[in-house]
Image: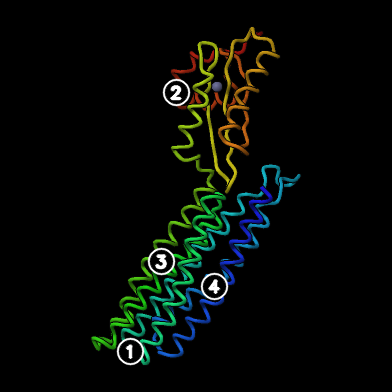
Amino acid sequence: MHNAGMQARTYLRASLVAALVVISLKLLAWKVTGSVGFLSDAMESIVNVAAAAFALFIVRIAEAPPDADHPYGHTKAEYFSSGIEGLLIGVAAVLIMIEAGHRLTHPQPISDVPLGAVISALATAINLGVALWMLRGARRLRSIVIEADARHLMTDVWTSAGVIAGVLLVPITGWLWLDPVIGIAVALHILSEAFSLVKRSVDGLMDKSMDDDDLAGLQAVLDRFRSADLRFDHVRTRVAGTRRFASMHLHMPGHWTLQRAANCRYAVEKALLEAYPGMSVTIEMLTSAQESLQEENAQMSVHAECSQQHPAPQQD
Ligand SMILES: [Zn+2]
């Protein structure tokens, strides 16, 4: 876990250094041409740096081991990072649209376009390389922070590609409105990216369950234990950054010895941890006939007719 955190920081530091180089190049492209497209492109990169620095800070918190104040760990801190990053991208998109709208109503000629385009293309190539490298790392480390940062860089690549194409066409066609129009189109793409990042954070903070593939895998593990004697129900899962949580009931005959029941519970927990290393598993042992009180209360309001299957506690 600690090692993964160190690797995550390596990715984020690299993206930070790359972003500083990219910003310098993009500001140079703006200075050379006076294009509002290049200016807004540079502005998006500045947001990148702020977001990457913040992500670096958050990863330190997320990797901290559980403590007395936070017994379930600190992995949810990652959702602050992706949420705020989504908001920052959204703000950048709106700023680009405002600037482009202004340029649309006040057309201005731009100069030295080929030189500016070459400088911006160099910056874009650096961004693309770093983004692809980070996306691979994010999948390997299962880190939403790195993924958010890499996606952010990818939107930067899209922005730049659109801006370079648009600005190059301006001197060829003489259409001064083309530069701001392409800027607005790219800003809309960035907005959708921002929306999906914010949605992801909300899902995490709202304790969304593991995805369908993981849920099917978990049920497959439980299927290996299901029998006439053993029943699982009230299976619940949630994901917090890189950590997974699962809780469930394990119902078994009331006449079993506690040792036999504990051995059974242990075997289930072991199988689950083999399938999902690092998962936090809570298995509540119950008799076949008895349901836990909180579940019974929750069920009763929804399925009153099922209460017949959950008779009152008896002395086992
Ligand atoms: Zn149950």
Q: Is residue 94 above or below residue 239?
A: below
- Apparent side of residue 150 relative to residue 186 in the rendered image (left or right): right
Badge 1 element? loop
Mark number displayed over residue 190: 3
Tags 3 and 1 touching, CB below 8 Å: no
**According to the image, label 1 marks what residue?**
106
- Disc 2 and disc 3: Cα gap in Å? 45 Å
Q: Closer to the observer: label 1 or label 4?
A: 4
Mark 2 or mark 4: name the one nearer the start of the chain: 4
Residue sitting at 65 percent across and 15 percent down? 261
Q: Local crowd at mark 2 within 10 Å, few (<14), some, or many (≥20)? A: few
Q: Local crowd at mark 3 within 10 Å, few (<14), some, or many (≥20)? A: many
Question: Residue 237 at what x, y percent from top left?
Answer: 54, 36
**According to the image, label 2 marks what residue?**
303
Mark 2 or mark 1: name the one nearer the start of the chain: 1
Q: Closer to the observer: label 2 or label 4?
A: 4
Q: Is residue 24 above or below residue 49?
A: below
Q: For the residue marked with disc 4, what is the amino acid?
A: Ala
**According to the image, label 4 marks what residue?**
19
- Disc 1 and disc 4: Cα gap in Å? 31 Å
Q: Closer to the observer: label 2 or label 3?
A: 3
Q: Quadrant of residue 117?
A: bottom left
